[in-house]
Structure formats: C-alpha cells, structure tokens
Image: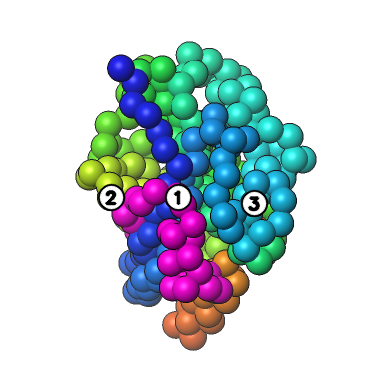
Amino acid sequence: MAPVFAASVCRGAVMHERRLPAPNRFVYPLATVRIPLSALDSLRVPLLGIDRPNVFSLQARDHGARDGTPLLPWIRALLARHGLGGVDGEVVLQTMPRMFGFLFNPVSFWFCHDRDGALRAVLAEVCNTFGERHNYLVAHPDRRPILSGEVLGAAKVFHVSPFFPVRGEYRFRFERHGPVVSTVIDYWEDGHCQLATRLSGREEPLDAAALRRWLVGLPLMTFGVVARIHWQALRLLFKRVPLFRKPLPPSRETSS
C-alpha cells in the first residue's frame, strides 16, 4: 500500500559552509512547509491562507508557471516533457510560505513520487536576488527510485551568487531518518567542493499550534532571509572574495 503523505511543518536550520577561496560558515534557524499538492485545495489550517492573504500564505503565483494556475497539472506536464510521465504519484512541495505577505524563497523542492510512494524525481526551483529563477530536475537516468542519501548531479547553469562563477556542478542528496528530513546541496568546481549547503529539520503536523510556535519563534523569518543574504555578502567582500559578472539567465526554464 502506498504511504499517505500529510501536510507538515519542518522546523530546523539551514547551514552554508564556503570552503574556497575563503572559509565562511553560518547556520540559521529555518522553517518550511511540506504540502502534498493533491491536498492543497482542501487544506484548511488557521493562520494559513491558500491563494489568499493570512499571517502565513501559500500562493500558486510564487511557484510553477508563476501565473496563479494550479501547481499539480504544471509539475505533471513538466515531468512528462522530461520523460518522467510515469511519475504519477504524490508530489510534495517543500517551501517557505509568505509571512505577512512577504517572501523571498531562494529554493523550493518538489518531491515527485510514483503510485507506490517511491521518490523518483526532485525539482529544485531556484530564485536569485535579481528576480530570475531556474529549475533543476534531478532523477536517475534509468528512472529508478531515489534512495535516502544517494547523490544526484546537475550542471550549474544559473547565476545565484556573485561570488561564484556559473560553471561546475551541484551534487544533491535527499535524506530521511524518521521525522528528520534533510536536503544537501554541494557545489563542486575543478574537483573541489566549494560550498556545502544543508537544509534539515524535524517534521510535525501542519496545524494551528505548529504555526503559532513558528510565529513566536521566527516571527520575521522571511524578512530575515533577505537581510542575512546581504550580511553574508558583506562578510565575503571584507574577506576579499572575488566577484563574478552576472551572465544572462539560461534560455531554458528547466535543466535536467
């Protein structure tokens, strides 16, 4: 029997560790929601609005086609275009919701399962501070299930930070240990891991109590994301890390 996917809050932290050319490491508390898209229209949770304002809100216009159209048909069509039409089970979107209407979401993850509940593909939806976005679709070449801790690669084609060039590759790992879920993204260039990133947290049911704890513990989280990005950029400038000119964004919306 296929597993039942329930909407949850994932409370934890994000870690970045730059290794070259100048070490720079930080860890910040972070929370995300993990929502099965098949349940999105029927989800009713106090403090959370679906395509409407609330303290927390999840807006279809922030994801997918970015035009407010339903998300599940969009991801199904994208998977089909990339030879993954058989991945027709639950899709779980892990993302930061808007808080008080504000959001900057550096990356969201779409976990795409087959009808038996096995993870077959993951879409990393990446945004930069220049208002651009790009999707990295990762799956095994033979479309076999993605197991916890397996490494999947993707060539870097999208400008995110002015302190890294657009070359090299990302190496993704998706891990689960009971209620603790983690996503690891290592950036490799010239045979060296230049940047290690880990987003991890513990799942709990998405309900009013969980959102109240979030609001008390991290009331300005989405505002803080932007502030911390700029603070870390200043630290790198003080360390004299070289800058790279921003290239044009890739012509394709999704690379796989």
Can residue 73 be seen here? The reply is: yes
Residue at position x 44%, y 60% from top? 209
Q: Position of residue 124 (x, y in %)?
A: 51, 42
Task: State the residue position of label 1.
Answer: 206
The 10 Å Cα crowd at callout 3, few under 14, some 14 to 19, many 20 or more, is some
- Could you tell me how many numbered marks the image carries? 3
Using the numbered discs, state the Cα–Cα distance from disc 3 to disc 2 in whole angstroms. 26 Å
What is the spatial separation of the Cα atoms under label 1 and label 2, in whole angstroms? Answer: 15 Å
Amino acid residing under circle 2? Val
Q: Which mark is residue 180?
A: 2
Are there few (<14), some (14-19), or many (20+) residues within 10 Å of tag 2? some
- Residue 145's quadrant in the figure? top left
Q: Which mark is residue 143?
A: none
- Earlier in the chain: of badge 1 and badge 3, it is 3
> From the viewer's perspective, is residue 63 above or below residue 12?
above
* Residue ID for mark 3: 49
Q: Is residue 103 magenta?
A: no
Which element is circle 3 on? strand
Q: Is residue 191 left or right of residue 250?
A: left
Residue bounds of the magenta highlight:
196-221
Q: Give the Cα separation between the discs numbered 1 and 3.
A: 13 Å
**SS for dot 2:** strand
Q: Amino acid at mark 1?
A: Leu
| 166, 121: nearer the viewer | 121
Q: Position of residue 32 (x, y in %)?
A: 47, 55
